Amino acid sequence: MRDNEESGLSRALLVGGEERSVSVASSAKPNLSSLGKRYYWSLALNALLLVLTIVMGCLYFSRANSSSSPSKSAAAFSADACNFGPTHHSHIVLPLASDRTSCAKQGAHFFMSHGATFFCPHTFDVKLLATIQEGDARKTLCDKHFDGVDTKKSSKVALRPTLPAGGLPALARGQLKSWTSNVMYHILEFGKDNNAGPGNGWNLTTIRTKPTNVHVLHVLYGRELEVMPKPAELTYLAHYAGTGGKAILSHYISTSGTSGFAHILKVLIQLPDAPSTGVALRQSWATFLTVDGREDNFHDKLGEGDTSVKGTLHMYDSLGMPATVSVRVTVTLDYYAGASDGFAGFGSMCPNKLPYPQSPTVCGMEIPR
């Protein structure tokens, strides 16, 4: 459309030039000096039109590139009072790889979980599959993680990007494709309450202070938290982590109290009649897994030493009808668990009262009297 308009304008100028030439040619005594001036003016106008066309084209493509990369434009994100910013949004990072060499390779995949809470501005539970651009950043992260695994100590690593207002909802919806963290932490232990953080209750070591650029491959799960019924059984989100039934489980966040906790672990999910056969989970989004006979609370969560625990995957059949699949779950790495520690904040609903910004999906409830 834009090209047609510009070419039409060009023709109009040329036609105008021809008409003026014809009118001069019909004169009995043509003025050669006037004809020369008109010719050069016509060239100048066409050159100017060409320059304007090039400039407009550059501006058009610049706007197109900007709109296709919302991560570079804070104005592209809509925000309400709860999703204020810019602010820090910590992510805990778990490599999918089973060894440090594979982990450090270019293109290696990492599971990232945002530190969600039942208060603003962290009221989105977001799980990502991502890559890390810098080779030295991958090596630092992988060495620290596998050092912890090998020595049976903390292997937790966290990144702490600063996102603009509305950045977290955009991340949950797949609109934010990349972000940068200027620090990388090895977390020995998170804090004791919601007010804890780096330099204020987190027991950590800063292992990198250069920018770490993260590229989001898939949003594995993204949901704005709200007040929901407590599940009847211990409930996890199961994320594909490789062949042979390898999976990462993250506790499904529904409500506060005994059910209000974050938990991330690596497991094997296998069929009961064929223990060597792993269940192939979908890779696009989480699949719900319930643990048979266990209550959804912190004390009944899965952990190190749990082998062939009975569980149920909630799926659907070839007709699209609800179906369940019995499985056995074996824990291979218990990575992180916390309730209200300055990373996760699920111990109580809406703990910060007015005038602190209030979540429309979590706050504003009154028990009928």
Image (tube, rainbow, N blue to C red):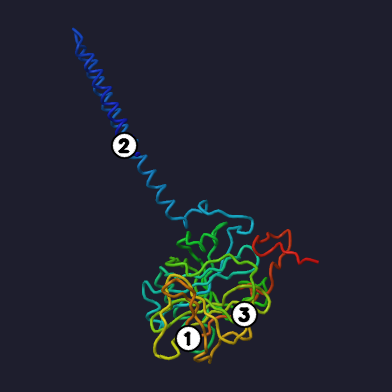
Q: Which mark is residue 252?
A: none
Q: Residue furthest top?
A: 28
- Number of callouts: 3
Disc 2 from disc 3: Cα separation? 63 Å
Give 105 or 64, whichever is nearer the viewer: 64
Instruction: Tell me the element at label 3.
Output: loop
Q: Disc 3 residue type?
A: Ala
Q: Are marks 3 and 1 in contact (CB under 8 Å)?
A: no
Pointer 1 residue = 327
Mark nearest the camera among 2 and 1 is 1
Of 213 and 319, nearer the camera is: 319
Say if 61 sits above or below 161 in the image. above
Q: Quadrant of the N terminus?
A: top left
Question: Which residue, as the protein is rendered here, is positioned at the far right?
Answer: 369
Mark in the foreground, 2 or 3: 3
* Residues at circles 2 and 3 in contact by the CB criterion of under 8 Å: no
| Quarter of the view holding residue 32 | top left
> Residue sitting at 40 percent across and 78 percent down?
103
Percent of width and height locating residue 182: 51, 66
Residue at image mark 2: 4
**In the image, residue 13 lies at what x, y percent?**
29, 26
Residue 131 or 232: which is nearer the viewer? 232
Residue 364 shown left or right of residue 208 in the figure: right
**Mark 1 falls on what kind of element?**
strand
Nearer-N-terminus badge (3/1) = 3
Q: Earlier in the sequence, mark 2 or mark 1?
A: 2
Instruction: Name the kind of residue labelled 2 in the image.
Output: Asn
Residue beneath disc 3:
232
